[in-house]
Amino acid sequence: MGTGTSHGIPVIGCDCKVCTSADPHDNRMRCSAYVVQDKTEVVIDVGPEFRLQALRNHIRHLDAVLLTHSHADHLHGLDDLRIFSHTHPCHYDRAAFPETAGKGLPVYGNKGTLSDVRKRFSYIFKPVKEGGGVAKLDFTDCSAYGKDSPLVLGGLRIVPVPLMHGSIEATGWLFSCDGSDGKRRSIAYLTDCSAVPEDSVALVKNAGGLLEHLVIDGLRVRPHSTHFSFDEALACGEKIGARHTWFIHMNHDLLHTEIQNYIDERLHNYPLLENIVKSGGSVSPAYDQLELTA
């Protein structure tokens, strides 16, 4: 639903070629994704534009929210979860699971992220006598889940992927489900990272069957202390080897077409990715409203 860095694009007050571009691929809301598998509906991150993203994508129901980390551009639309938590108070069936009914909309994140949310949105946890409705949320530390014990929502298997975002421990997410041919296919979403530990690389490669899509942080050409540069994203993509690799969290240095040209010009440095592209795969910048199917 969004592929831009923390400022969003266009950036306030900026007249650069990207911010004034007429190409819709260059208009980038803050990063967020909407995942649908049959009747299961999940969002990753709820940034400042979440309300607009939910309206644009006609989201009417949510079974869970997955958080990557607690920075404002990924979290500060949290209050707009109110409508989902009130109309769908719990993803469990009330009759079959009475002990969990009514706890609220499930929200998953690592321990540090959920701690930050409780501090930053403390009003959610205070008693309200009347008016001023608040989101009804049920927090769960995602460390309880892994390759051999995934979070299961409907036919969707979800595995948290530990990442480093500078000095912050962030969380990527791996989604997989079984296709009609009996083969399991997956999509990995790894935003806001400056390092993907080797164990996490192995997890993404092995925990979800055939990896159709890798969605990965790729901020800009120049190095950054807390985000992958384009070349670092390509190097990580080379390790993982998804059929399709997509950059997100891009800033306003380059147009969408220029980012694609940059990738194409350097692909020979990454022989696995180059061979994947030659066999029908792709390596490209993502864009808002891009739909991926696994």
Image: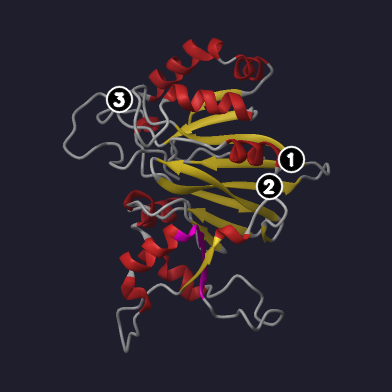
Callout 2 amino acid: Ser
Give coordinates of residue 257: x percent, y percent. Answer: 41, 20
In the image, residue 61 above or below residue 270? below
State the residue at coordinates (36%, 43%).
29
- Quickly name the residue at label 2: 176
Residue nearer the viewer, 131 or 114 = 114
In the image, residue 191 above or below residue 74? above
Looking at the image, the residue that sits furthest to the right is 182
In the image, residue 262 above or below residue 132? above
Q: Is tag 3's residue or tag 2's residue first in the polypeptide sequence? A: 2
Quarter-of-image position of residue 179 = top right
From which residue to which does the magenta span run?
104-111
Disc number for residue 253: 3
Closer to the eye: label 3 or 1 = 1
Horizontal side of residue 104 vs 154, given as left or right: left
Callout 3 amino acid: Asp
State the residue at coordinates (56%, 29%).
245
- Give the structural element (helix, strand or loop) at label 3: loop
If the image is split into quadrants, where does the N terminus sit?
A: top left
State the residue at coordinates (60%, 27%).
239
State the residue at coordinates (35%, 31%).
26
Q: How packed is label 1: few (under 14 Cα within 10 Å), some, or many (20 or more)?
A: some
Residue nearer the viewer, 198 or 208 = 198
Residue nearer the viewer, 150 or 58 = 150
In the image, residue 272 above or below residue 90? above
Q: Are marks 2 and 1 in contact (CB under 8 Å)?
A: yes
Residue nearer the viewer, 42 or 239 = 239
Visible in this render: residue 293?
A: no
Q: CA distance from mark 3 to mark 2?
A: 34 Å
Give coordinates of residue 177: x percent, y percent. Answer: 72, 48
Give coordinates of residue 284: x percent, y percent. Answer: 51, 25
- Quickly name the residue at label 1: 209
